[in-house]
Amino acid sequence: MKAPHPEWVIPDWQAPAGVRAFVTTRAGGVSRAPFDSMNLGLRSGDDIRDVLRNRAILREALPAEPAWLRQVHGAGVVQAAAAAGEPEADASWTAHRAVVCAVLVADCMPVLLCDRDGGAVAAAHAGWRGLSSGVIEATVRAMGTPPGRLMAWLGPTIGPRNFEVGDDVLQAFLAFDAQAGLAFSPYPGRPGKWLCDLYTLARQRLAGLGVTAVHGGGYCTVSEPRWFSHRRDRGTSGRMAAFIWRG
């Protein structure tokens, strides 16, 4: 197994020994513009041969083929070791060694989780729809670990200065928790529009569950060219992926 590409990101958390994780960037693959170069999304519009080659390059840095999901911006969670094909879900977890949980992203947030003794890991795809639907809560429940024993890492997502949303998004979160309003600020000069902070929303959800060891955040897929961004690139964008496994 090779080391991850030097431009891929290793989470900045104190995960227990044996837990491994990383997030790809645009670097290290063979896809051509506008999908250059490490596009891992089979349904992104890229040449399928290039995507498969990228996945083969990726596989060299993993202990096994990832448990890919057919993501639908919901709250479904599967056990990665038991999943066949690409199940429709937005999160997976495992307590088995060398089983790789994976989520594809290109503005939505990857949330990686592990327990403090390294016995279980999980990956969730958390855009605003998934967050408001409870994908983090569903993932924590599926892991079966007391939340106070979990660690979380928040990966690259669209940042709060670039995520313009409407009243419908604000109301979706306020219906769950009035404190969610702290993650929204009015968009200057645009009534009914808001700037949304997904990192704050994710931290609120984790805190509400009792997960206190939360790391990561601070990225912006729109403003940082190393990431793919569905919004910045007007829908013609590749996909990064986040991975976590027990070694």
Image: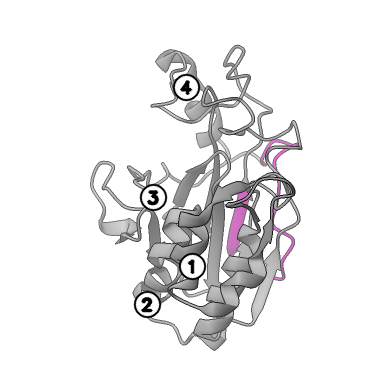
Closer to the camera: disc 4 or disc 1? 1
Tell me the colour scheme of the image: one colour
Tell how many labels: 4
Magenta residues, dominant SS class: loop
Q: Is-magenta flag for residue 111?
A: no
Measured in 3D between alpha carbons, the distance from the residue under mark 2 to the one under mark 1, in whole angstroms, is 20 Å
Disc 1 versus disc 3: distance between alpha carbons?
15 Å
Structural crowding at the residue carrying mark 4, measured as other residues with C-alpha within 10 Å and reported as few (<14), some (14–19) or many (≥20): many
Answer yes or no: is residue 125 visible: no
Left/right of residue 129 with respect to residue 105 in the rendered view: left
The mark closer to the camera, 4 or 3, is 3
Q: Residues within 10 Å of mark 2 (few under 14, many from 20)?
A: some
At a point 70% along the width and 53% down the height, the residue shown is 160
Query: Which residue bears the numbered disc 1?
Result: 173
Relative height, residue 13 to residue 236 (above, below)? below
Numbered mark located on residue 141 in the image? 2
**Labels 1 and 3: the sequence-earlier one:** 3
Which stretch appears magenta?
Answer: 4-22
Q: Is residue 211 above or below residue 96?
A: below
Q: Earlier in the sequence, mark 3 or mark 2?
A: 3
Q: Callout 1 environment at 10 Å: few (<14), some (14 to 19), or many (20+)?
A: many
User: Mark 3 — residue?
Assistant: 73
Estimate the x, y position of residue 110 in percent, counting from the top left. Answer: 55, 53
Q: Look at the picture and state if 209 lies above or below 166.
A: below
Q: Tell me which numbered mark, 2 or 4, is placed earlier along the sequence.
A: 4
- How far across and how far down the image is residue 212, in percent? 63, 82
Are the two marked residues, 4 and 1, in contact with CB atoms closer than 8 angstroms?
Answer: no
Q: Measure the alpha-carbon separation of dots 4 and 3.
A: 22 Å
Q: Nearer the viewer, mark 2 or mark 1?
A: 1
Q: What amino acid is at disc 4? A: Val
What amino acid is at disc 2? Arg
Marked residue nearer the N-terminal end (2 or 1): 2
